[in-house]
Image (spheres, coloured by chain):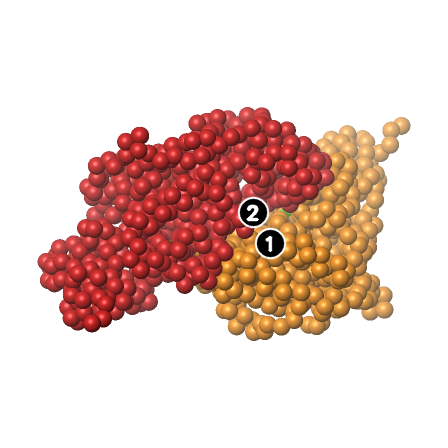
Chain colours: A red, B orange
Amino acid sequence: MSSPARTLRLQPEDNVVVTIDVAQPGDATSSGVVAAARVPKGHKMATAAIAPGAPVLKFGQIIGFATKAIAPGDWVHEHNLAMGEDFDRDYRFGEGVRPDTLLPEAERATFQGFRRADGRAGTRNYLAILTSVNCSASVARFIAKEVERSGILADYPTIDGVIPLVHGTGCGMADKGEGFEALKRTQWGYATNPNIAGVLLVGLGCEVFQIGRMKSEYGLVEGERFRTMTIQDEGGTRRTVEAGVARLREMMPSAASARREAIPASELVLALQCGGSDGYSGITANPALGAAADLLVDNGGTAILSETPEIYGAEHLLTRRAVDRAVGEKLVDTIHWWEAYTRRNGGEMNNNPSPGNKAGGLTTILEKSLGAAAKGGTRNLAAVYRYAERVADHGFVFMDTPGYDPVSATGQVAGGANVLCFTTGRGSAYGCKPTPSIKLATNSDMARHMTDDMDIDCGDVLDGVSIADKGRQIFDRILAVASGEQSKSEALGYGDAEFVPWQIGATM
Amino acid sequence: MSSPARTLRLQPEDNVVVTIDVAQPGDATSSGVVAAARVPKGHKMATAAIAPGAPVLKFGQIIGFATKAIAPGDWVHEHNLAMGEDFDRDYRFGEGVRPDTLLPEAERATFQGFRRADGRAGTRNYLAILTSVNCSASVARFIAKEVERSGILADYPTIDGVIPLVHGTGCGMADKGEGFEALKRTQWGYATNPNIAGVLLVGLGCEVFQIGRMKSEYGLVEGERFRTMTIQDEGGTRRTVEAGVARLREMMPSAASARREAIPASELVLALQCGGSDGYSGITANPALGAAADLLVDNGGTAILSETPEIYGAEHLLTRRAVDRAVGEKLVDTIHWWEAYTRRNGGEMNNNPSPGNKAGGLTTILEKSLGAAAKGGTRNLAAVYRYAERVADHGFVFMDTPGYDPVSATGQVAGGANVLCFTTGRGSAYGCKPTPSIKLATNSDMARHMTDDMDIDCGDVLDGVSIADKGRQIFDRILAVASGEQSKSEALGYGDAEFVPWQIGATM
Ligand SMILES: [Ca+2]
Ligand SMILES: [Ca+2]
Ligand SMILES: [Ca+2]
Ligand SMILES: [Ca+2]
Ligand SMILES: [Ca+2]
């Protein structure tokens, strides 16, 4: 007798499992249920009777409703499952809010981090050179190169490095409106990210993004932690590089005095990312990362889900988890903004399963978007933020960003993320400074193929490792990396080219 | 007796001069005309009688029409000068076309350049690492760093360097439409720019901007001059870096075999740029650069004017110079495209003189835009190109780009520019690879203040150096830099952070 066909249950309350092997009628399966029909690999098999009109649950969430009676062992797909009529316009704000799952303080995890003056905690200790505009990008890099060449940092081993964060925008743009505001929040967010001990902000002088205006709007004061300069004031490239190196030298003793200490995991702000998804993303790495996010939230920490275009169609499941109506409505407003944004740019929002998705086992838009949202876990939605806005709430939160990895992560880091987890199926080479990025492979083949880049192989979920155990493993790695252990992308030196602020609006 | 008030005549046919000193009624001026009114510094004084309704000429072009009789010595400004009614909708295609001014072949200048296989000429001899997407940016930089660390290039002194050209886009974008097409032209344009001897194009693998698609659309064939790879195919960061270094090593012997030889100046393709303009831009550096552009065109070469938002309002003067109606209409279409582009992004096209501009002496939108367009000189408009489109015509041409310097220059270099001149009043620190950039200061104060960055001080035009002589000096420097002399920005090491393709459309 052959071994039962493997299946995967994503959450205990689900009434379907995902098949890892093809199941033929009469086949025993690892779910304990005997297949009543042929169920292709990666598709859904019912493990309970589902009455017509009753919800089908996957990821612990409604992915649609039975269009006819479904028996245990049945294949569940387009022939017997559909979105409920008008379900997609029914936000049911807060209906799905669950009781608090916070651990008692005594049971909460800690990590070794840097306590900053504003009370937040860093997991790294960088000096950063920010740039107001592309016109000062080369000078920022020359300053960093000169610091490296000089060998000054050898005297300050507790400083992780001097990072030039250069970009392509800052001029040729409107000096007000959402594009300008997004850039301003991004710059300020990086300047104050707790992984950065001190900031030198370098401009050209005549750009649209005026440093003086940013300083006055945020009440920024020059000092040991924050200095600014412009190439036009200093008198050209060489003098600016010299003066910039001098300013950084002045910052080093104070930056170097930071020491790691035990800090509650509640001070961790975890950015959730995925890029280069595949058919396994929604059933291995994303749910496993979601379990880790739940653990972090239960420890009082913060997990930021983003990538609005990828959760499109599942927003009414997030609104059910919203702690109050205002939070839910802010998410809905965000969705409407995206519909207008894509429309005025000649496109449309569309996250419907493609024919390829359907062949792979995805039936509804809910199911597809939930695969992406699964990395956010299952806790209540505490807040919704604009791109690059400072994340102040603890718990599970959403930040509006594009799906494009570097732009999305830049917004999250600006929001204060001090650690980042990134799931990938095709194999992303993403890395970040100042925020360490942990890469999670959705399948073992890719994890082996790109072994230098992948921190954790989540493909073993298909071999029987539970989502809960995998989540615990990821959570432990988050604590270790937050405490100073290098992630793979950090060891490779990533992070100098991945600062990409979202450009909204016309380039003039 | 005091010396006469200084004035500046921009073109011989002008009926106004610009005052360098304030002129009081009765003051002698260096134009030979006695001031009949107080004329503020930087403003216009008539040097001939102008009848009501007759054109006022500055830059050798119509900047408006007299609204009352103007006598020699009169101050010319809003009280007696305005745009003609409907003048701004009257394109008069080709009416201003002038006879050919091409020099006899025997009298034409030459430079020492690299003759490429496709017949075009390079002024530099780089190897480039292009990136299809931000996700391969770090790997591109790691490859360049490893080449540098290895010291291989010491064996190939005729190679100017290995440049990683990284950017923020390539995914999270529509896979068709004007944004995608602009990026495709940009990548292909860099890959084939004659200043580049060989190209390694590195991708991630799953990005929207697919390398395979670009290869098939342009018929690109892998060989000694062009190689591609993806991180996902190679198996991660380390293997891609190793393989990338190996591919570049294979390209080096052939790249290094290039030798400079005498090449007609007709093979020069000059990108015209300005950034950080001031009140002197339109009367010193821009007209001087225009004179150099005219010299280049008379030598059979090509000069590319760009920055559509900055010539807005003067397009009907360029259409008069268009060699045929189709060329003129293409420019008008471009203007209309920009009106729609800014409108759908919540802005509007507006290049009207501001109150500050008016106080400084600019009366009409024509005059303001002509100050920017003056760097294009006075020759016939031979062609109009889309952003990053291959420039195939010789003569004076226009390429549609934003005004923002790095984005504009990226389009011009993609178009094939092998040398670049950049005027600046406030003081730009721009530099470019693979195309050397020559920086022209509009005023001597800034030229002294930023002496490490400025190649030529055009402020001496105010002290009596003629526009024609200044143009000759710039033209000679263009030939010298094209022949291998380093520009200031090259010596400083600029050009690794200024590759900024125009992002059109939504970031998803
Ligand atoms: Ca994703
Ligand atoms: Ca993504
Ligand atoms: Ca709140
Ligand atoms: Ca300009
Ligand atoms: Ca410009």
Instruction: Give the numbered dot on residue A36.
Output: none
Residue that carries the numbered disc 1 in the rendered image: B141
At x 21% / y 51%, what residue is drawn?
A: A12
Cβ atoms under marks 1 and 2 closer than 8 Å: yes
At x 46% / y 34%, what residue is drawn?
A: A113
Using the numbered discs, state the Cα–Cα distance from disc 1 to disc 2 in whole angstroms.
9 Å
> Residue B327 in the image: x percent, y percent?
61, 64
> Who is closer to the viewer here, A246 or A40?
A40
The chain that hosts pointer 1 is B
Residue that carries the numbered disc 2 in the rendered image: A496
> Residue A339 in the image: x percent, y percent?
35, 51
- Tell me the amino acid under the disc marked 1: Arg
Element on which disc 2 rests: loop
> Who is closer to the viewer here, B300 or A398?
A398
At x 23% / y 71%, what residue is drawn?
A: A2
> Who is closer to the viewer here, A68 or B395?
A68
Q: Residues within 10 Å of mark 1 (few under 14, many from 20)?
A: many
- Tell me the amino acid under the disc marked 2: Asp
> Who is closer to the viewer here, B198 or B432?
B198
At x 71% / y 69%, what residue is drawn?
A: B254
- In this rendering, the count of numbered labels is 2
**Above or below for B474 versus A263:** below
